[in-house]
Amino acid sequence: MKSIVATTYGGPEVLRAVDAPPPVAAEGQVLVRVAASSVNPLDWHELRGMPYLVRIARGLRAPKPRGQAMGSDVAGVVESVGPGVPRFTVGDRVLGFGLGAWSELMVVGEAGLVHVPDGLPLTDAGGVGVAAITALQGLRRGGLVAPLTWAPGEVEPMRPRVLIIGASGGVGTFAVQIAKLLGAHVTAVTSTRNLELVARLGADDVIDYTTTEVTQGLPRFDLVFELAGNRRGRDLARILTPTGALVSCGAPRGQWVGPLVGPAVLAVRSWFSRRTFTSFLAKRDTADLQQLADWLGTGALRVVVDEVYPVERIADAVAHAEAGHARGKVVVTL
């Protein structure tokens, strides 16, 4: 089977297509014939081995295990199931994420998959995985758990005010939509060319960061969701309400201690404040994946696809996504 691997750290140019033996689903695993995947920051950080902390898990001098396919998001069709997997049968369409998605066949733990809703193309489903679950879990970390409810005759409560920085990217396009589904008033920060896009996704207000500095003004947001990774926490704290939350999952700064310093500073700040300051990484959660699939199935949530690349152009896909100008997801088809 065709598999995209990297035997050394580097940029997209080190990716290679190789013939690899097909994997076998063990207990609790599902073998998926991959139809589509996408490119996430996680993928190019692992590809480059940057920041260097990545190499503690992946190998100091070269990625290990050798021959392991790259890629995380997956959408495809179940080829076989291992023992102890009651939720899936051969032929089911599935989406989720794991390790080794840039390959014709991929083994995924059952917990990392859900059924693709009827009517959702597998190309779109390949762009869900990491980005969508990051958006959902990040908003929940900031206190946006469920829409507000009120009884007949009661005054409608004020909607939480959410600022999403980096609203037109892979995570951001999901975050705008999910925040609206959870009942928030959403202000989206993006560049000039993407203002119309985020407005169409449901943002109540849009800010062009090329002309407006978002950290100036009175405290006004209950949650700031920072996805761009280029603003200091102390600046963003100025626009939080007294009990607001700053959630950051932007790209780490620096190659050595930077990725550790940022989260540590946020944690210390939280100890001495009524407000919440946190940095997080998304985790695999079947219930969260199912919630996303349910929204996708009803049309309440959609996948914004910037461009679709065949796997033969995987290096171009990674370079395009890493440049940081993609609107929504960069999808790869196999």
Image: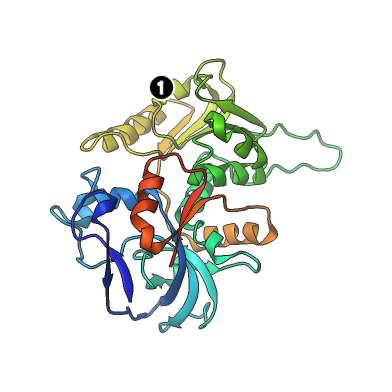
Find residue 101 and report its image quarter: bottom left
Q: Residue 244: x and y, percent?
A: 53, 29
* In the depicted structure, whether residue 91 falls above or below residue 206: below
Q: Is residue 127 visible?
A: yes
* In the depicted structure, whether residue 127 falls above or below residue 122: above
Q: Residue furthest left?
A: 61
Question: Crowding near pointer 1: few (<14 within 10 Å), some, many (20+)?
Answer: few
Q: Nearer the viewer, residue 141 or 302?
A: 302
Q: Residue 7: x and y, percent?
A: 19, 60
Q: Residue at x 44, y 61 (%)?
A: 37
Q: Residue furthest top?
A: 217
Quarter occupied by the N terminus: bottom left
Q: Circle 1 sits on which residue?
A: 234
Quarter occupied by the C terminus: bottom left
State the colouring used for the structure image: rainbow
Q: Residue at x 52, y 39 (%)?
A: 142
Q: Residue at x 54, y 73 (%)?
A: 93
Q: Is residue 138 visible?
A: no
Question: In terms of secondary structure, where does tag 1 sit?
Answer: helix
Count of marks, rendered view: 1
Q: Residue furthest right?
A: 153
Q: Residue at x 52, y 42 (%)?
A: 172
Q: Nearer the viewer, residue 215 or 104?
A: 104
The type of residue carrying mark 1 is Arg
Q: Nearer the viewer, residue 64 or 27?
A: 64
Q: Is residue 300 left or right of residue 215?
A: right
Q: Is residue 300 left or right of residue 251?
A: right
Q: Residue 97: x and y, percent?
A: 43, 62
Q: Residue 16: x and y, percent?
A: 26, 62
